[in-house]
Image: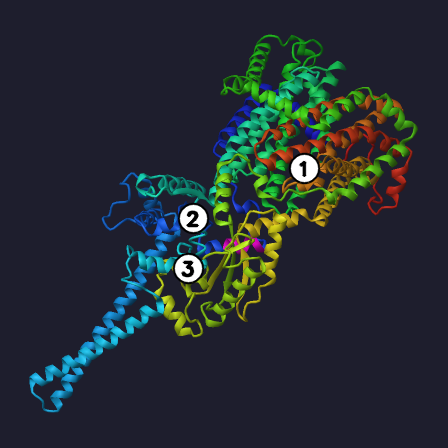
Amino acid sequence: MRNGLERIARAAAARPVVVLLAVVALACGGGALALGLQPSADTDTLASRSSDAGGATAAFHRDFGDDAILVLIRERVADLVLTADLGRTIQLEGCLGGNVPADARPYGGDSSPCAELAKLKPARVVYGPGTFLNEATRSVADAFMQELTSAQERSRAASAAAIRAAKRQGKSAAEQQRAGEAASRVAAQQASAALLRLAVDTGIKGLPQIDNRAFISQIVFDPARGADVPKSRFAYLFPSADSALIQVRLRDDLTPQERRRAISLVREAVAMRMFRSARGGTYTVSGVPVVVEDLADSLTSEIALLLVAAVAAMALVLLLVFRARLRLLPLAIALAATGLTFGAMRLAGVELTMASIAVLPVLIGLAVDYAIQFQSRVEEEREAGAEGAEAVGRAARAGAPTIATAGLATATGFLVLLFSPVPMVRGFGVLLVVGIALAFACALTAGSAALALGTRGRGGAGAGGPGGADASGERGRAAGRVARALAAAAAVPARALRSSAAGARDILASAGRAIVSVAPLRALGRGAARVASPRAVLGASLRRPGRILAVAFTLAAVGWAVETQTDVVSDVTKLVPADMPALADLTTLQDATRSSGEIDVVVRGDDVARPEVVAWMTDYQARVLRRLGYDARDGCADARICPAFSLPDLFSGTRTDSKEAIDGLLDAVPPYFASAVLTSDRDAATLAFGIRLMPLDEQQQVVDILRDELNPPKGVRAELAGLPVVTAQANAELSSAGRRLLLLLTGLVAVAAVLFAVYRRADRAFVPLVPIALATGWSALVLFLTRVPLNPMSATLGALVIAISTEFSVLLSERFRQERADGHDVATALARTYRSTGRAVLASGVTAIAGFGVLALSDIRMLRDFGIVTVVDLVVSLIGVLVVLPSVLVLAERGVFARLAQRLPLRRRGRRAPRPDVPAA
């Protein structure tokens, strides 16, 4: 490995202009591709389709459509359904459903939102008060017409039979006619009596017409609750006496662009003048798709903010703490790696999520770290007398294997995130692994080329050996051109800041405040001062290493013990931007309807429209509503769930004790309306419940109650679906102390395996692992004491700490071994390690802290808290490793860990261990 990395670095240093131009071209191409990344906050980012909840939700969407866009109508129901506003509502629902009126011109004309909705047809089904009352009126009118037609047919049949009977009796034609008329009158009287009984039984007054106020009132209102109070079984249409709800259930096969356009068109349609209420009613568009798309839109602006803030913060930190030539070179390399990573993300067809946005500052911080470490090695070689490509080659030989090992171990720590139950967190880990590989490659290639150019013409042997001092002509001019190009590239962020809208100074000030405001960073400032002059720490490590390690272990053990007590933020409203309009609309929706989401119980079988299945669904619905506090007399005011449109609602007030009765009723129900709760082949039906906004742990309790009550008939299966089920399940898994402990142990084992595979010695792999393991406890303790909450991203705390601590520990421990291999005693080796690599680690650590810290600028609470948690991890890990590692190294020199390693089944017998300063290939 060592020779291979050295050859790569020397090859890049030998052709610096070509290498730099190639890397810049690839990075710019990747950045251009990244501009086309599509943001996504879909439910698939929260739960995998392979999980129970995710799979059930995906199947539900295929059968019944995607989550519904909800249009809340804030208007007194009596004014809405008993005036001309009902006609406007019917037209609005037709527009949202993409239906073209009988005159073949869309509402509002050919360029209206209704016309585009008619072309796109994004809705699988639309149902609301207009559709319901229109279909109900039509169905009742059709039933009456069928009864009248049947009566007429019976009357004609009775008249014909009487005429035939009179003719057989030999009566005259006049007598036959009179007999027929008499039979017809009797049949008509019987039909009239039957229609009268039907009217009495149903309570229908007047003709079943949409503009018949008496007829509409009888359908909608419940006299027992009040003259203008809707019937409780219509809660999904009329949540209260002052509100109504239109549901637009989207097709599940819409592309992200089509879904985004459909939401925009719905908003434009409800704002059209022709649908404006004459009674002062207002519309609010909300629902899961609306909130998800608004959150996705905010991701686009977030990535621009975080990029500018990260570049500005890191440039400032590098200028302050990195004492080397080309101070901004690490940042330029990091930007190149970032462009390549996000460009590869676009080529792979991956969408932009909240987690992948968090990769941006994290990756920039790690890439800057690798570049600083490599550049510091080159500076050491330059101070030793080497120049140009020779300095780069020596630095690559001495330091690149260690940096590569640290990067490999860090990547392994992030790979453990693949065990997370949240898909976007798994994607976060994979993207960081790819980014780490590209960051190291950029540091080794573009970094070598730039550093070779940067040291030419400064005296010494030069890049090309003996002839290097004479390379002043064309070579010097080329170096000048490339140096100016690099300077121009480094100045791009500054120009972007100057030209950005009224915000450069504000962004920098905000970044500064965010970084300074984090309490652990102030501690870092005090700790860093001590590390910069490490005599006290190193002296204590030489004198009392066991005592220092005992104290460190005790603090870590306390942290492990209290880690399960750290709060996990589970309220969805606290994880998204507080000022997001869709969140305010969702709150308005809940205030009016007492629910903001929907849980669906999907019932599947050969025929779910059988009497026993319908009876079970009706009983199940009543049981869970009663158990969760719903009372039809009080509505949804104090209940955790409310009834929503379900299959039993189609049979309300009718007989369902026979298959014939059910089939007859389903045949009478408009297929368009029935398709919202029953598939065409009747192999799946749905029970729906509205659920209020609540913390996810309380939401999980509701889900558990719904699941506990599931006892479907034989041959029928039932499962829960919907976003509330998905998010509650993901939160329960993330909040599990056992899962977090397993993730931590898996990360430690994975890093240990990588270090052992590289070094081929258990004691050598064990030494850097000690402070890594202890850092997980220290971070947990600090988070517990500072009460910084966790969320679905930062709940993977252990894996993050392991990944972050690994690099610091590996770099320092390997530099110490190299110093010992050069013949220095323990004290001198420690001092030289902390004067060289220690300072580089401190500079890269502070730079990485700045990168993670810019997440605190995010309006998205999940990202902001993740940034704060990660900064705490990084600060604690940096200080802890710098302070504790010397004691571990001293104990290792005394053979403590070697004796321990001899007891482990990891040593490979019969193979001579490599020298301490030479990593195995």
Mark 1 vs mark 3, CA separation in Å: 64 Å
Q: CA distance from mark 2 to mark 1?
A: 57 Å
Amino acid type of the residue that numbered disc 1 sits on in the rendered structure: Ala
The residue tagged with tag 2: helix, strand or loop? loop
Q: Is residue 247 visible?
A: no
Mark 2 touches mark 1? (CB < 8 Å): no
Outermost bottom residue: 169
- Expressed as whole percent of the image width and height from the top left, the position of residue 813 reads 80, 30
- Residue at label 1? 411
**Quarter that holds the N terminus:** top right
- Lower position in the chain sequence, tag 1 or tag 3: 3
Residue 660 place in picture, x, y as percent: 39, 74
Task: State which quarter of the image contains the C terminus.
Answer: top right
Report the amino acid beneath label 2. Answer: Asp
How is colour applied across the structure in the image?
rainbow
Residue at horizontal 35 percent and vertical 54 percent from the top: 131
Residue identified by numbered label 2: 242
Question: Between tags 2 and 1, which lies in front?
Answer: 2
